[in-house]
Structure formats: structure tokens, C-alpha cells
Image (tube, rainbow, N blue to C red):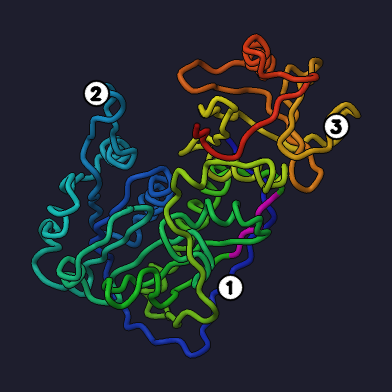
Amino acid sequence: MPWPRLSPFTPIRTTRHARPFSSAKEKFKILFLGREEFSCIVLKELFGAQDVWSSLEIATNPDERVGRRGSKLSVSPLKMLGESLEIPVHLIPHEKSAFRHWMPPAPFSDGASHNNLLITASFGRIISSRFLGHFSPTRRLNVHPSLLPRLRGPAPIQHAILNGESETGVSIISMLKRREGIDAGDVWGSVKLAIAPNTTYSDLQDISALQGGKLLVSILRDMIAGTAKAIPQVGEASHAPLITYDDSVVDFTTMSAESIARRYRAIGHQRPITVYALDGCTIQLGSPSVEANPPSFVRDEPGVSCLYRSESAILVRCIDGSVLSIPRMKPEGSRWGTGKDWWNGVKSMNFVKDGTYRFINKRYVE
């Protein structure tokens, strides 16, 4: 599958007020921490650059039972990739309390060797100060998908799309101890990335990880040569907190069609975009998009919907006069169907009045 066609990125590695870095001279012994697809793409770039490492090991999450009654086994994508590349894989404790006391495996636990290097990418865990103490301060790197100090936190890709930003990027930073600040370390290098129209989380994740992996390898080569430099973060910080259920709930009377469609592209992969029905139950929205040329029969009142028979979709007027098209819907306790399927169901329950259906903006309370 080809990489998404985004505008060309612009390197912005700057050296003003940079802190000099002594040459590593030898290849690194690397411990790589991650889990998701982002970390897999970065690891592939790193694995292919065997001029920068003499050994490479992985630490990632253990297998976990998820779903109803543990019916599904969730396996770390990084674990599967590591095993396929015959890279040694270490599994961290499942419980966060136990992970706080977990220490790196040998040889990384033997002291802060000049050539031991810790790299994290989409790891999702806070690393203890004691763990970080096994690595020199300039030997702890994080691949973070934003132009720091913008969008510090665990969900920068999602929030870049949610915010409607036209530009983001990826940064390689030093990891600090928690008391010193999350994602606040010095920047070794950054790359700007344009956010193309209709970009999805998957699109932006893949291109950010690819360019982040390439940038990481370039910086490691500079470290070995003794030319790498890091600078403190400059500018006003913003934050990208974890995505919650509240982020997935939409309200046609306060949100535009574009903001709802953007929300789907940003977080729909991890949380279904949801609206409340008249009976207080939830409805998941599949592939919502802005209707560029809505028919004249769409009511002007936000939150009022109608059936667009030719498309088997539901059209809903939103707060700014825009119209959202919803081709697929999943009522609570039911299966996915077309907008027309859902419409026929609510019509049979006498919820359709004068050819329209009105959504509510919160759970029904008698």
C-alpha cells in the first residue's frame, strides 16, 4: 500500500543555542520500547539501518484478553514484528504498578554505558526515574508525532486532526524524568508535515512514523559522528490528552458537519462516533461526511434529519447550516446497516414526524 500523498515535509533541524554532543564512535546497543503500528513503522526504519546499531532488542506489552469475557487475544503488533525479524523481545508487566518497578534487561541494566540507547515510540506507559537512570540523559530518545512543544501528550495525531490543523510534524526528543516534564525534553530534530484534506488518523500515523523513523536514523548517525545537537523547546506548549468517550459523542445542535466528519477521521479507529436517539439509546455513525450539495427538502433546524433515498443515507442539518451525510448506522444492541435501514426502523416506531427525525443531545431522562 503506497504512503498517503501529503505535501512535501520540510526539515527544521536547527542548531541555534544547541548543546554539543560527544561522539558515540561505536554503534549503539538499543532497547526499543513501543507497541502500536506507529512504533512498528519506526522500528522497520531502524532495523534497516544496521550501520547505527550493534544490537537491537524490544520491550513491549504482553498478550492480553480483551472483549466480552476475554473472548479475543490482543497481541502487541511490535511483538509480532520483532519475532518476524528475529529481534529479542522482552515483555513488560501487564499491571502498571508492577511496571513501575520493572528494570531493563541485561546489558541495559548493567549501568549507563555510553553506547546503551533507549528509544520509545508510541509506548503508552510512563517510565520510572529508576528505569531511565540506567541510561545517560543523552541516550534516552522518544519519537513524538508533533512539532513540540505543540501537542504534548499521548494523542497528538488525533488532536492535530480534531483541531483542524493544516500542519503537524514529528520530533525526536530527549526523555526526561516525570518530575521534569512529560514530552518536555530537548529536541534533536523535527520534520514538518502538511495535513491534507480528509486525512485520517491512519494516514497521518503512517507518514509521521515513516518520517520519524528516517529522522531518528539520521540523528543516530550524527550522534556517532559527533555532529548531533539538541536544543530546548521554544514556544507555547499545548496538550493532546487521551481520547475519552466524551470525545466520541456528537451533537448536531452545537457542531458543524465538518467538525463531526473530522472527528470520525481522527478518532473513529479507536472510539465509535456516537449520537443519542430519542429513546435515550446510542447510535454509532459510520463514515459520516459533509454533504456538499444537500437537497432542498433538508430542514434548516440543527439536529433535524431526513432520509436521502437515492443514497440510502441520513442527512442531518448541523449548527452552521452545513449538512452531514450518514451512510451507515449501528443502533445500540443492533448490527450495522444503511441509513435507510435505520430510518425504516424508527419510522415503524412512530419516531418520524412529517418526514423528519429529531436527534437529542443527551441521554433521555424521564
First reached walking from the N terminus: tag 3 or tag 1: 1
What's the CA distance linking mark 1 and mark 2? 49 Å
Relative to 192, is 185 on the left or the right? Answer: left
- Residues in magenta, as a range: 192-196
Tell me if residue 201 comes above or below residue 67 in the rendering. Answer: below
Residue 283 against residue 165 in the figure, above or below: above
Secondary structure category for the residue under label 3: loop
Question: Disc 3 or disc 1, which is closer to the eye?
Answer: 3
Element at badge 2? helix
Q: Is residue 229 left or right of residue 309?
A: left
Residue located 76% across and 23% down the image: 356
Disc on res. 12:
1
Gap in Å between the C-alphas at discs 3 and 1?
Answer: 43 Å
Relative side of 240 to 192, left or right: left
Looking at the picture, tell me which residue is in the foreground, 77 or 241. 241
Quarter location, residue 65: top left
